[in-house]
Image: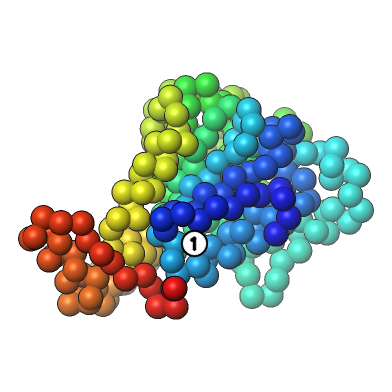
Amino acid sequence: MNDRVLLTLESHVAHVRLNRGDKRNGLDPALFQALAETGRRLVREPGVRAVVLSGEGPAFCAGLDFQAFMATPNAKELLLSRPADRPANLAQEVGWVWREVPVPVIAAIHGACFGGGLQIALGADLRYASPDAKLSVMEIEYGLIPDMSGSVTLPQLLPLDVAKELTFTGRVVGAEEARSLGLVMRVVDDPLAAAMETATAIAARSPHAIRAAKQLFEVAPRLSVREAFELESALQVALLGSPNQIEAVMAKMQKRAASFRDVEGST
């Protein structure tokens, strides 16, 4: 992983920081690659119980750095490269991989969150924004369409007519309108602090139950009612009587902090 992304792991919380603050975290080829590599690493990290996504400098991510791509040979081929075993090409991976991370991902948004930056944030499970945050499905400004997994993540979050209107116009919405539309769930003065607080609270819960809950809500909406109910039951049966489920009950009864085991393979 290059220095375009900073990753810290502390107390079961992973903090992923886009690290091109001087460019408002504009997406260049190196940042695309670093984000995808970081996400894929966190898919495999058994000791991680929650992830926070944030951006260094004045913005979460102002979108694609067109100048950097124009100066990069084979940039188009790089973005469109799609491994045979993956649903996403590299451009889509940086938004979609957070859905595949098996634990909750929280995006802390401040400043500009435009185009590709918004699509990265849409991949998170939760989005907190600062009062000064500005969000836009901005691709239409450049004669383009969302192509970093937004075709799936945006309509999952918003009514289809709202998703279309934002995509057709490319208009910039402020934090409070974004909250009313459903693009973000909370507007807070310090979204990073709020995101870390939520991540810490999640990390104190049974990691097996948290992973099962994320799997349930990621998969069930794509299933028939019967299949969704079968998945719900299967996940619950696997939790019932497990060491972490028993520990959760005992900690609750004894009014103490629980001590949970991580998923197998953690150290």
Question: How dense is the environment of label 1, judged by Cα within 10 Å: few (below 14), some, or many (20 and up)?
Answer: many
* Camera-side residue of 42 and 261: 261
Q: How many marks?
A: 1
Residue 231: tell me if it is visible.
yes
Q: Which residue is mark 1?
A: 101
Q: Residue at x 33, y 64 (%)?
A: 207
* Camera-side residue of 156 and 35: 35
43 shown above or below 127: below
159 shown above or below 130: below
Q: Residue at x 44, y 73 (%)?
A: 267
Q: Residue at x 72, y 43 (%)?
A: 27
Q: Position of residue 86 (x, y in %)?
A: 63, 70
Q: Amino acid at mark 1?
A: Val
Residue 222 appears in which quarter of the rendering?
A: bottom left
119 shown above or below 38: above
Q: Quadrant of the N terminus?
A: bottom right
